[in-house]
Amino acid sequence: MTDTEEGEGGPNNQGDGNPKESSPFINSSSASDVEKSQQYDGKNMALFEEEMDNSPMVSSILSSLANYSNLPQGSKEHEEAENEEGAAPSKKKPAVKAPSLGTLMGVYLPCIQNIFGVILFLRMTWMVGIGGVFGSFIIVFMCCSTTMLTAISMSAIATNGVVPAGGSYYMISRSLGPEFGGAVGICFYLGTTFAGAMYILGAIELLLIYILPQAAIFKMEGLEGADMEAAMLNNMRVYGTIVLSFMATVVFVGVKYVNKLALVFLACVILSILAVYAGVIKTAFEPPVFPVCILGNRTLISKGFDVCAKVIERDNGTVTTKLWKIFCDSEFLNATCDEYFANNNVSEIQGIPGVSSGILNLFGYYLEKGDFLEKRGISAMQDPDAPITNSNRYVLADITSFFTLLVGIYFPSVTGIMAGSNRSGDLRDAQKSIPIGTIAAITTTSIVYMSAVVLFGACIEGVVLRDKFGEGVNGNLVIGTLAWPSPWVIVIGSFFSTCGAGLQSLTGAPRLLQAISRDSVIPFLKVFGHGKANGEPTWALLLTASICEIGIIIASLDAVAPILSMFFLMCYMFVNLACALQTLLRTPNWRPRFKFYHWALSFLGMSLCLSLMFICSWYYAIVAMVIATCIYKYIEFAGAEKEWGDGIRGISLSAARFALMRLEEGPPHTKNWRPQIMVLVSMDSEQNVEQPRLLSLTNQLKAGKGLTIVGTSVVGTFLNNHAEAQKADQSLRKLMETEKVKGFSQVVISSNLRDGTSHLIQVGGLGGLKHNTVLVSWPRTWKQVEDNLRFRNFIEVVRETTAASMALLVPKNIAAYPSNGERFTEGHIDVWWIVHDGGMLMLLPFLLRQHKVWRKCKMRIFTVAQMDDNSIQMKKDLITFLYHLRIDAEVEVVEMHDSDISAYTYEKTLVMEQRSQILKQMHLTKNEMEREIQSITDSSRGSIRRKNPSNLQSQQSSEEPAGVSVEETPEEEVQLIHNKNPTSPTTPAGSAATPGSEVQMTWTDKAETQAAAGHPEQGGVKDIFNMKPNQSNVRRMHTALRLNEVIMKKSKEAKLVLLNMPGPPKNRMGEENYMEFLEVLTEGLNRVLLVRGGGREVITIYS
């Protein structure tokens, strides 16, 4: 079974842009039949040997199934593969090294390293001071619960089958589809990129404030307020850009250096946290000496003075201190001093009283920007109206703080839970390691964070906690003051860990972007899929560094943190959604090994993520959602079609089933009626559509709304002609895409076109979502002998749609109809309303004018008045009716006066009938010939009766039993005749021959036999060229000519003419005549749309 293994490790994403998963089930062996029989001889497989090409033996495939791998190449394998491409083809590729990482090294420690980060060291103490132990504990608990619930959902997804390298992006995209996958993948990428910016800003803050303050380019000494803040931000920007450039260069030169340093950075993080815990334990026995100087109840900046007192006793005298000189105009005791300084005492408190001191800091202390950091419980003498002076000597709040801000700043410190799943390609057993390692890491970090909140609150004085930059404790890092043996352990450790985290973000983000680019779901990102010869994503790194620079320019850690919180929260939200959907939809492939999950937990996690997004920052949340929505719609509109078996498709199926069941409850109300169109097209020998403009007209009628089915029929059998049908289907889909017709294609294979078309009309659609209108083009070449079958098929379509109560639209001269790109700047759409059809004639122009092609055209409605009609009243009624329908149109009533039938009409009818008879005789068999003779005889006798109206009644009653059909006249005309002849005589049987019964008379074998028996003298073939025209046909021809004359007079220049389509003959004798009448009716008109209603009202005056 060597052939099956070729799929493994090969490029999965090449070809048509729709990646095929490499499958171990395909055997590409091309053995001959003889070889096959020998190959499977004695293996009890004779029954199946014909199918061995695509269904190999289980025994031969088990080893491939057990070791089946569909992993896209990770960075190491990719590097090796790229290097091997340049090698000689004869050289055998070395075997890819098997993944060897276990749970501890592969998942647990990377997660720990990614979760612990800059926020813990730089902002955790400040958060406890501002929010209090209660508030901070709630924040930590909420955030940790969110990540724990997300980890449970992620574990379920990660253990549901083989997890390829690609982590969260892969999981979401394969669970929720390319649109959600692309949108969330980009959000995750942006989150990781901004995380890089945050880590760099954290490293610069540590460098410039705590390690090397004199390195500042923009000096901050002596500056106050906004000037000092601006100088600080500018320093951050300059140094941030330098560090970013350096880190990007390191990543570009080689990722292996970053990977080698990862353990060093991890050791720094763990040592720093252990130093903090050691310091907390030490405070219980021997609290460190970190005095804080308080003036009144305000905290003083510790720089600029040495003794926390106004005066000191020296050499039996009172001497002023440096602090006195700061607040007074001279060093003498009689100097003029600051009012607040003069009225309040200076006191010194212990910054870290220790665990045993009993301080708790339970409640929050939120500050406005510029507020003084005040010690609770100390009263101060202060004149509320006095101006504030020497504010630069006090520790001030640098930003306005509130609960939601703290959530936004803190949340990045719990991100990083995807680190294990991102390395899934390197794990020995990803399905076991990812859940255990991730959940253990979150549990560990959550315990550390929660204990840190309580311990910070119990060890450190409130004013020190709220002192973000340690200005009151000699510029020390506040968490560093707590650490043992020295603050420098934390400062140096946190600096290296933030640098390492920044490097890892700049390493991971470009690879994530490269993975998204190579999936080809977002076309404009394809360029970022390329890289160096060894697979390093050069272009993606460049884009990542550019986006990262945006975060550096923002320059404030507190402003950048909520941004990346948004993107990570959105990513986590969709991981939870993916798990919940898969569980609720009960997808057959949803069989995770991790059993401790539930859809309710996933929904709770999703709700928490959404809530936290808006708690952190409602405007950032909206921006993140807009970005994700734009990417989603872009992928939906322009992205490559992917079928990944995602959950959204499952939702679509469930929703579609539910909607179809609802539609079954009853027919749509008239207000909701719209044409659901079945477009019948014919194909040429190459399976290309012969009338592409039919689909243009469909698009103009539908404007993308409602159901559209484009159907065609292929002659043959399913087994022999399946390939042709597939080609026809592809041709239809391609044309539908070109013409922007949103709908479905349907191809049936039948022994003849007539049956195929009938099947389409009968079975198109599903349940309540069926077509109610058929669109078929006029058979242009129906007069040609070879197209005789085509026009008969056309008439059968007319009959079937009438029988099925469907509307029928027949565009004539379809090639002259406008394409979707054309625009009519003026002109009219003329409606000739001759008989009522349920309002189709009114509705269609309204729908057409919604489309930009017809938008500028005006609508005109013409109706025909007979001699005894009141045309003025008709016009008034029609205007009122249109007003109630809310349709704007000009109205005109055309009067049709009685006139004599012209010789031209007789001649045209005669030519038509002669041609019809010739055609029939050319195609008749012997039996049909006899039947045709009887038809001709009876029709001539019918003509004689009409020429002798005085004998009409007696002949009518005597001839009816002989089977003469009166069905050639439309029902309306028959009714009109009977109205003019109200007295209907009785038949020989004594029963009344009502108009309805007369209309329903049809040919029967019995009737034909009687007719032949009653008139044996007329058995010979009639001389076609001596025949006289049928009176009924003459009258119809007269009507068609008169109507055509009127329509040509009024609507010759119209862009489109819509008129009622007469019904087909109920017997099959006059089919050619019917086509001729329609031809005469529409002669000389450029674009005509013949319309037959479906027998129901489709437009209403009610709201």
Image (cartoon, rainbow, N blue to C red):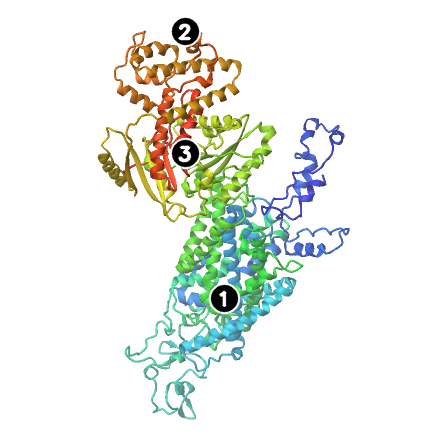
**Which residue is more in the foreground, 14 or 577?**
14
Residue furthest to the right:
90
Please state which amino acid type lies under the numbered disc 3.
Answer: Glu
Residue appearing at x 61%, y 48% in the figure? 13
Q: Quadrant of residue 362?
A: bottom left
Q: Quadrant of residue 408?
A: bottom left
Question: Counting residues from the N terminus, which is met first, the one under dot 1 or under dot 2?
Answer: 1
Residue assigned mark 1 = 550
Question: Counting residues from the N terminus, which is met first, the one under dot 1 or under dot 3?
Answer: 1
Quadrant occupied by the C terminus = top left
Residue appearing at x 44%, y 10% in the figure? 1018
Please state which amino acid type lies under the numbered disc 1.
Answer: Ile
Residue assigned mark 2 = 1014
Depicted 1005 relative to depicted 294: above or below: above
Residue 847 visible in image: yes
CA separation in Å, label 1 and label 2 = 102 Å
**Which residue is more in the foreground, 154 or 705?**
705
Q: Position of residue 433 (x, y in %)?
A: 59, 50
Question: What SS does tag 3 mark?
Answer: loop
Depicted 752 relative to depicted 63: above or below: above
Q: Point out the frontmost of discs 1 and 3.
A: 3
